[in-house]
Image: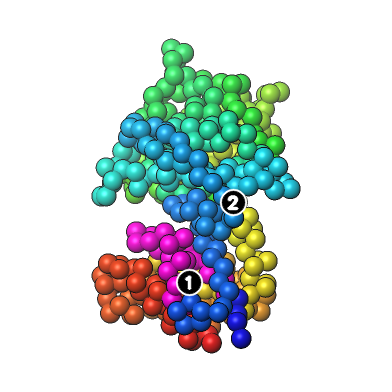
Amino acid sequence: MAHTVVIAPDSFKGTIAAADAAAAIARGWRAVAPHDVVHLMPMADGGEGTVDAFEAAVAGARRIPVSVIGPENTAVLTSWLLLPPSADAPQGTGVVELASTSGIELLGTPPRLRALDAHTRGFGEAIAAALAHGVSRLVLGIGSSASTDGGAGMLAALGARLLDADGEDIVDGGRGLADVAEVDLTGMAALPPGGVHVLTDVTNPLLGVRGAAAVFGPQKGASVAEIAELDGSLARFAAIIDPVVSGSDARQPNGGVELAALSGAGAAGGTGFALLLWGARLAPGSDAVAELLGLREAVASSTAVITGEGSFDGQSAAGKVPAHVSAIAAAESVPVALVAGRITADADTSAFAASVSLTELAGSAEAAMSDSTHWLVEAGAALARALA
C-alpha cells in the first residue's frame, strides 16, 4: 500500500541547505518505498535557505536575478524569488532573504567581520527590485545578518534620507549611524498592498542588555567598547525617529523609542526595528513559513512526516523547525520522525516516532559532515524501514 510522506527539514547549518537535505532524505525513502508519494516541503526560520525553501515547495516559483551592494561594499549577484499569483497576492509575492544580500556568509569563511562597517543596503536594494517588479506582497527573511546598522542601509535603499549635522547622507554601517542627526522618510517606497511579512525567530528589543548590539554584536566582531558605541548609536537613532513617526504623516502610531522596545526590533542588528518603522509585520519564522507553504494541510493528508536540523539539542524545543513541525503532526495525529546531524544527550526526542543521528550513522561528526548528502540518503532509507 502506497503512503504519503511529507519531508520538512530545516537546513543543516554549515553543511547542507534545507532543500538539498529534503531531496536527499526523499531519495533514501524512495529507495525503500518507491511507490510512496513524497512531498518535499523544506523549511526555514528566516535565515539562510529561506528562498531555497520557498522555491522547492511552491510550484511555479521563479528566481529573479539582482545585483546589490554587499556588506563589504562590493557587488553581490544574487536573486529574490517571485511566487505565482494567489487570491491574496494577485501580482505575486516577492521573497527576499537578508542572508544572500547583506548576510554574514558573504564575508567569507572564516568571515572577515566588519562590526562597525557592514550594512544592510544590499537587502534594501533587493526589496526595492521586488517592489519595482510590482509584487502584491513581500516575505522577508532577516536571519544571518552581518551588521548592526539598525536597518539604516535598508531604509536608505528604499528612499529614506539619513542625514548628519551638515545635511549630508551618513555613511553606511553602524559607524555612520553615530552621525545621524535627521531622518526623512517622505521619499520611502510604499508598502505593497498585501503588506510585508518578516520572518524572524529573534524576540530581542533594539536596545540594552538584551538588545541588538549586546547580544549579537560579539558574533559580528564587536568589542566591548564597540558594543557600547553601537548601542548608543541605535538609541540615538530611535530617539531621532521619535518625532518623525509620531507626526501627522506617521507610518506607525508609535514613536521610535516605543518601536525599539517591541519584540523582534533587535533582529538582524536592528533591521527588525527599521522594518517595524516601515510598517511591516514581524512573525516567528518557522510558524510563518509553515503557514505560507500550507504545511498543516499537507501534513493532514499524509501518513508520515520527517523533519530535522543540524543539531537537535535541549534548545530545539524552543521555536525551532523540528518542534514546530512535530507539533503540527501531533495535532493531526500523524507520526513524525527526526533526522539530525547530531542528537545531544539533553535533547528530548519523545515527540518522534523514530529518530536518526547522522553522526551515529556515519561513525563520527567529521564523517557525517564530509558527505552529508550520502548520510541523509541513508537516514531516509532507515526511517522508511522504521516507519513501515
User: What residue do we see at 42% from left, 41% from top?
Assistant: 78
- x%, y% of residue 359? 33, 75
Disc sitting over residue 60 in the figure: 2
Residue at (34% x, 72% y) in the render = 374
Magenta run includes residue 49: no
Q: Do callouts 1 and 2 mark residues in contact (Cβ within 8 Å)?
A: no
Categorize mark 2 by other alpha carbons within 10 Å: few (<14), some (14-19), many (20+).
few
Give the magenta-colored segment's residue range. 5-29
Whole-angstrom CA distance, mark 1 to mark 2, is 21 Å
Q: Is residue 386 left or right of residue 327?
A: left
In the picture as drawn, the residue positioned furthest to the top comes out as: 166
Q: Which amino acid is tagged 1? A: Ala
From the image, tell me which residue sits under label 1.
26
Q: Is residue 228 above or below residue 22?
A: above
Question: Residue 252: x percent and y percent?
Answer: 66, 33
Residue drawn 67% across and 40% down?
A: 91
Residue 126: percent from the left, percent from the top?
49, 36
Quarter placement of the N terminus: bottom right
The residue closer to the viewer here, 33 or 279, is 33
Residue 241 quadrant: top right
Residue 378 image offset from top left, x and y in percent: 38, 78
Q: How many marks?
A: 2
Three-letter residue code for mark 2: Gly
Viewed as shown, does residue 90 lie left or right of 361?
A: right
